[in-house]
Image: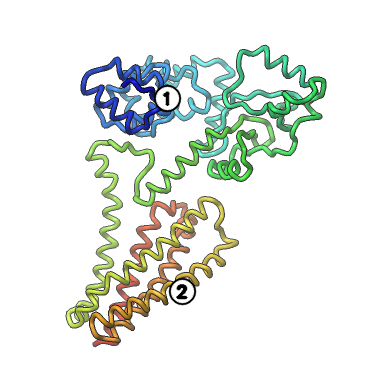
Amino acid sequence: MTETAETHSTESRLELLTQAMDSGAAGQIRKLLVNLHPAEIAELLESFPHGPREIFWELVDPDDRGESLVHVNDEVRAGLISEMETHDLIAATDGLDADDLADLLKDLPGAVIQEVLRSMDKQNRERLVAVLHYPEDSAGGIMNVDTVTVRADVSIDVILRYLRLHNDIPATTDTLFVVDRTGQYKGLLPLTTLLTNDPDQLVASVMDREVQPIPATMPDDEVARLFENRDLVSAPVVDETGKLLGRITIDDVVDVIREDADHHLLSMAGLDEEDDTFAPIVISARRRALWLGINLFTAFLASWVIGLFQATLEQVVALAVLMPIVASMGGIAGSQTLIIVIRGLALGKVGKTNARWLMYKELAVTVLNGVGWSLVVAVIATLWFHDQAIGLIIAVALIINLVCAAVSGLSIPFILKRMNIDPAHAGTVLLTTITDVVGFMVFLGLGTIFLL
């Protein structure tokens, strides 16, 4: 425990803290916590099971609790809040930025929310209302309303003297925002421009008028894409009339990117990124039961198709041996297309205008791979069972199923998106069902026609 926190990963910190808890060394735990950022504390909270988590939370400095609550996922946050006293919750919200407080407020008890609002001055209350007005997955929902604004008709010297009168400026400030008397956004004044130009020059002569503001209603994933494409560090956010509301900074965008990545990864398994990893067994089992049930239904559907050809399988055992190859190859090929399309939709690179071209490309790739691998499988099957008919049947079935898988992998995300269903959530289950059913139907159907 003598090394500083910066030298440790979350895993090693967790090990050190667990050892300290087991030995009852509360002082050592507090010593380690002193060097941790609230976001790092949040990671550790999510990594502890229930019991140790509550003990660890009690040792967290009250000044770090508010921001730590902001960084943990929803379920862990709700559990910690339920164990806290009203006065502790009110104290935890003190000093939080409006955007962070907006994220936290929705999980607080009603009585605490009222107390928090009463304790805020008019300006901060208005800032909070501005953030709460927009969905949390929009530019307005992730923006920070703590900005520094200047007018275009004043000199750089006036701006510098104005800044010197203040003890500090908002964190991660790299630019000042130029507005008119009514608060309408007019342009940017980067700090580098402020420091490297003649103090007697007017802001209007050196300001950047080219940077377009971000509408508060823009989805957060589009905001992240905009930051990536334009290499932005910060950007202004405006309402529908062009009035400056706040700013988005790169640290906000990093959070969005990580949350979206977690969402897409876990959704493909029917899970939620806001779930507690160490949730009670019964709760976790109940959540996963739905998708297991759906998968069971699709498995029975595939089994029913196989049952239709029971007589064929009894007479031609080779079909039963080779049958999984057809379904497996179709599933893999379809998943490749599915993932490409889901990623393209998420990044805005795939849409109605280029879907047909992507279809042609995927079909061409599938046919090329299908012909190549079907020949390989056909040769192996022929040598294995000494029957050229079986080799030909499985080759044809493979090509048909691979083409069907490519079409399904491309069309399923578009269909689900049109139905307002997350493609990452249900796409894999639907694709697996289609490739299994079609694969078994074609292979066993051809076997029935030509081998009996």
Which quadrant would residue 15 be assigned to in this image? Answer: top left
Q: Is residue 40 above or below residue 440?
A: above
Question: 314 or 64: which is nearer to us?
Answer: 64
Which of marks 1 and 2 precedes in the sequence? 1
Residue at screen point 24% across, 70% down: 304
Residue 259, x across and y down, in percent: 45, 40
Q: For this view, does 345 lie left or right of residue 22?
A: right
Q: Residues within 10 Å of mark 2 (few under 14, many from 20)?
A: few
Residue type indicated by callout 1: Pro
Q: Is residue 73 above or below residue 330?
A: above
Residue type indicated by callout 2: Leu
Query: Which quarter of the rendered picture does the N terminus lie within?
Result: top left
Q: Is residue 108 above or below residue 421?
A: above
Q: Residue furthest front?
A: 2
Residue at screen point 75% across, 24% down: 151
Residue 89, x across and y down, in percent: 39, 19
Question: 433 or 323: which is nearer to us?
Answer: 323
Secondary structure beneath label 2: helix
Secondary structure beneath label 1: helix
Q: Is residue 299 above or below residue 106?
A: below
Q: For this view, does 248 lie left or right of residue 53?
A: right
Number of the front mark, 2 or 1: 2
Residue at screen point 24% across, 68% down: 303
User: What's the CA distance linking mark 2 and mark 1?
Assistant: 53 Å
The residue that disc 2 covers is 368
- Marks 1 and 2: in contact by CB < 8 Å? no
Residue 309, x across and y down, in percent: 23, 77
The residue that disc 1 covers is 38
Q: Residue furthest left?
A: 314
